Image (cartoon, grey):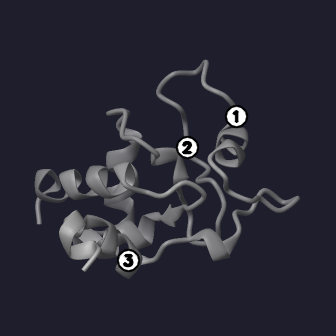
Amino acid sequence: MQEHEWSEQVEEVLNRLPEGTWTSYGELAELVGTGPRQVARFLAQGYGVANAFRVLRSNGTVSDGFRWSNPTYPDVHDALRCAGIRLSTNRVADSAQRLDAEELRELLKPDFEAHS
């Protein structure tokens, strides 16, 4: 699948990411049928994808390569806490708040399907 075919799905699911949750590059990649590096590269391009900072490595840590597109933005760990993500003293996100590919798939269902 080409990037333009799956990038809209990534954007849509991140727009619908409930407060207090996070996901990983691998879970997003599984959802859209590509690799985690491709997802990371897409998010790093700085298109201003909502909630991109809530996409973490599978172990719950911020990617070493994470950079805000605007350098005046707050520390990413502070932003995660403000979004309701619980972080350990080692700055690892609470795994209980992680959404897997199946849970992300549910977010993409139309409202009438999700509530039936």
Give the quarter of the image for residue 36. Answer: bottom left
Determine the secondary structure under disc 1.
Answer: loop
Would you name the residue on which mark 1 appears? Answer: 75
CA gap, disc 3 and disc 1: 27 Å
Secondary structure of the residue carrying tag 2 is loop
Real-space Cα separation, disc 1 to disc 2, in angstroms: 11 Å
Choose the circle earlier in sequence order: 2 or 3.
2
- In the rendered view, tell whether residue 46 sits above or below residue 104: above
Instruction: Count residues near mark 2 (Cα–Cα under 10 Å), then give few for <14, some for 14-19, many for 20+.
Output: some
Q: Would residue 67 appear left or right of 37 to someone viewing this image?
A: right
Does 112 appear above or below 69?
Answer: below
Picture mark count: 3
First along the sequence among labels 3 and 1: 1
The one of 3 and 96 positioned closer to us in this rendering? 96
Q: Are marks 3 and 1 in contact (CB under 8 Å)?
A: no
Which residue occupies the foreground of this view, 111 or 62? 111
Q: Quadrant of the N terminus?
A: bottom left
Question: What crowding class fits label 1: few (fewer than 14 Cα within 10 Å), some (14-19), or many (20 or more)?
Answer: few
- Amino acid of disc 1: Asp
Query: Answer yes or no: do the residues labelled 2 and 3 have beta carbons within 8 Å?
Result: no
Left or right: 105 in relation to 83 = left
Check the image and report above or below for 83 versus 56. Answer: above
Which quadrant is home to the C terminus?
bottom left
Q: Nearer the viewer, residue 98 or 116?
A: 116
Residue at 38% across, 61% down = 37
Q: Which residue is at 58% across, 53% downward? A: 63
Is 109 left, or right, of 53 in this rendering? left
Give the residue number, with chain letter if any, for mark 3: 101
Q: Badge 2 is on which residue?
A: 66
Q: Position of residue 49 (x, y in %)?
A: 36, 40
Quarter location, residue 82: top right
Q: Please name the residue shown 43% across and 57% down the image.
A: 17
